[in-house]
Image: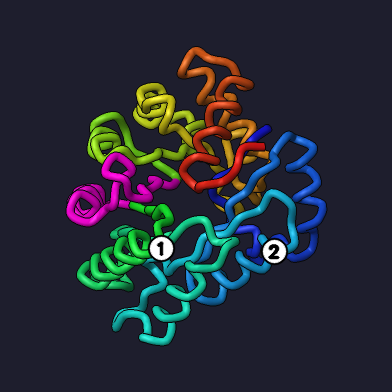
Amino acid sequence: MIFDTHTHLYWKSFDGDRDEVLQRARDAGVTRFVVVGTDVETSRAALELASREEGMHASVGIHPNDLGAEGPSASDLATIAELAREELCVAVGETGLDYYWDRVPAARQIAGLRWHLELSAAVHKPVIIHSRDAHEDTARVLGEGLSTTRSGGPGGVMHCFTMGPEELTAYTALDMYVSFSGVVTYPKNDANREAARLVPADRLLVETDCPFLPPQVRRGKRNEPALVAAVIDKVAEVRQSTASEVAATTMANGLRIFGLPTD
């Protein structure tokens, strides 16, 4: 059994064949999914999918690129806070920092991240973190505001971790879970593979981030949950393990961080 811990299955590119996509995933052994919202509309869509699909769970939040130059409205923040308390919601986010794009000022992104960290602690659900070209600020803000599992808090997930061993240390020091995506299969990403080798076994997760970032075998095409098997294969290779062992480890870790009962 496999847990794809980060998907965007509400994405329009799945509208024509979503049922077939889910069947392929289940045929590949994927039995658990987290569908991650990036704004109010998609957070609601994530919860709607989770309400009707077996093994599917939702996360709600506002992506740093979707905060707007002036910040989200009070109404939007109140809605996300309300949705975060829904039973089918297992996490807050995705939130974080993205300095690759510049349409949302850094100060606004940091404020948004801090707001999500406070919400995570309030509802006692882990926070899902996106970080792109913003490692130093991400690590600093998390160090100031993350409610860690070590201290009895809900903790957090570094989603789609694309960095290397040097950056990894900052997040493992916070007892965070670290999730690897199709990026770990790309030929030039030796540093990311080394991070996948080094992350503690009890903090390792896998994901697709579909429809984005397909593994090398499907590079340039739409990603989907069935392809998380290629991520598992590569992580198993670099950890000198087996795919079945990595699948079992990441399933157990996913159930633990998201507060789900064992299968």
Q: Nearer the viewer, residue 253 or 26?
A: 253
Q: Quadrant of the C terminus?
A: top right
Q: Which span is picked out in magenta?
A: 132-159
Residue mark closest to the camera, 1 vs 2: 1
Q: In the rendered image of this protein, does residue 23 appear above or below residue 71?
A: above
Estimate the x, y position of residue 158 in percent, counting from the top left.
38, 45
- The residue located at (74%, 62%) in the rendering is 52
The amino acid sitting under disc 1 is: Val
- The residue located at (76%, 50%) in the rendering is 21
Q: Nearer the viewer, residue 105 or 147?
A: 147
The dot on residue 70 is none
Quickly name the residue at label 2: 51
Local crowd size for mark 2, using a 10 Å CA cut-off: few (<14), some (14–19), many (≥20): some
In the figure, is residue 222 to the left or right of 42?
right
Estimate the x, y position of residue 173 in percent, counting from the top left.
24, 35
In the figure, is residue 72 to the left or right of 39?
left
Q: Is residue 186 visible?
A: yes
Circle 2 SS class: helix
In the figure, is residue 238 to the left or right of 27?
left
Estimate the x, y position of residue 28 in percent, counting from the top left.
74, 35
Marks 1/2: CA distance?
20 Å
Estimate the x, y position of residue 230 in percent, counting from the top left.
61, 31
Residue 150 on the magenta span: yes
Q: Quadrant of residue 92?
A: bottom left
Quickly name the residue at label 1: 123
Q: Is residue 98 visible?
A: no
The amino acid sitting under disc 2 is: Ser
- The residue located at (39%, 39%) in the rendering is 177
Local crowd size for mark 1, using a 10 Å CA cut-off: few (<14), some (14–19), many (≥20): some
- The residue located at (65%, 51%) in the rendering is 222
Circle 1 SS class: helix
Q: Nearer the viewer, residue 41 or 214?
A: 41
